[in-house]
Amino acid sequence: MKYEITIYGNPVLRKKAIPVEKIDDSIKQLAKDMLDAMYRSNGLGLAAEQVGRTEAICIVDLPVSLDVDEVTKKRVNPGIKMPIIMCNPVITKMEGEQIGQEGCLSFPEIFVTIKRAATIGVKFMNMAGKNEILEVSGLLARTVQHEFDHLNGILLVNRMSTVQKLSVAGKLKKLKKMNKA
C-alpha cells in the first residue's frame, strides 16, 4: 500500500503504539511500505503513526555520509547495517548529551534545536522475529530517540521550548488547521 505521511494535527500522531505480537507477512509489508514512504519524503526515520498506523514499528535509514563525527571524520556507528527496522523498541540506556537541529516529516519545514542522549541502547524485535540489542551514538541515536518518541505519542512540539513554540506558532497553527482528521 502506498502511504502518505501523516501531518501534525492528525490525532493518530498522539496515539501510543500497540505492541507487535509476531512478525508476519502484514508486518513485513508494513515495514516495506513505510520504507517506501520515508524514502519518497527524504526522511531518515519513520514511525507507524506517521503513516496512520498504530503498530509499534519504526524504521531508520541513516546514510553513511551522515554517520560521521565532525571532528575525526570517522564513522560513528561503523558496525550498524541499514535500514534498521524495529518492532516494540525499548530504550535500555541513555548516556551523555547532544544538542542539535531536528526536523520531522510530520512537521514539514520546521526545524528546532533539541537536547537528546548522545548514546543509547535499544532493544527490539527484528524482522526475523528475534530480539536484537544495538548501541548507537550521534545522529543515529538522535533519530532512534525521535522515532521512539513517536511510538509513545510524543511529538517534536512536545520537545520544543516555549520560545521555540512561539517562533513556529504560525506554522504549527497552519499545519493543525489543514490536517485535522
Image: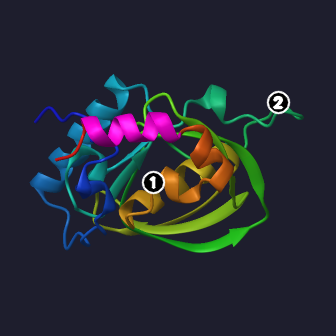
Residue 161 seen in the current view: no
Q: Which residue is mark 1?
A: 147
| Horizontal and vertical percent position of residue 40 | 32, 23
Q: Name the mark nearer the viewer: 2 or 1.
A: 1
Q: Split into 4 quadrants, where in the image is the N terminus?
A: top left
The CA span between labels 2 and 1 is 26 Å
Q: Which residue is mark 2?
A: 73
| Horizontal and vertical percent position of residue 86 | 38, 58
> Disc 1 marks which amino acid?
Glu
| Horizontal and vertical percent position of residue 96 | 79, 64
Q: Which stretch appears magenta?
A: 169-178
Which is the main secondary structure of the residues drawn in magenta? helix
Q: Earlier in the sequence, mark 2 or mark 1?
A: 2
Q: Is residue 152 above or below residue 38?
A: below
Q: Is residue 9 above or below residue 135?
A: above
Which type of secondary structure does the marked residue at label 1 adopt?
A: helix
Q: Residue at x 25, y 46 (%)?
A: 31
Q: Residue at x 21, y 38 (%)?
A: 33
Residue 45 seen in the current view: yes
**Residue 57 lies in quadrant:** bottom left
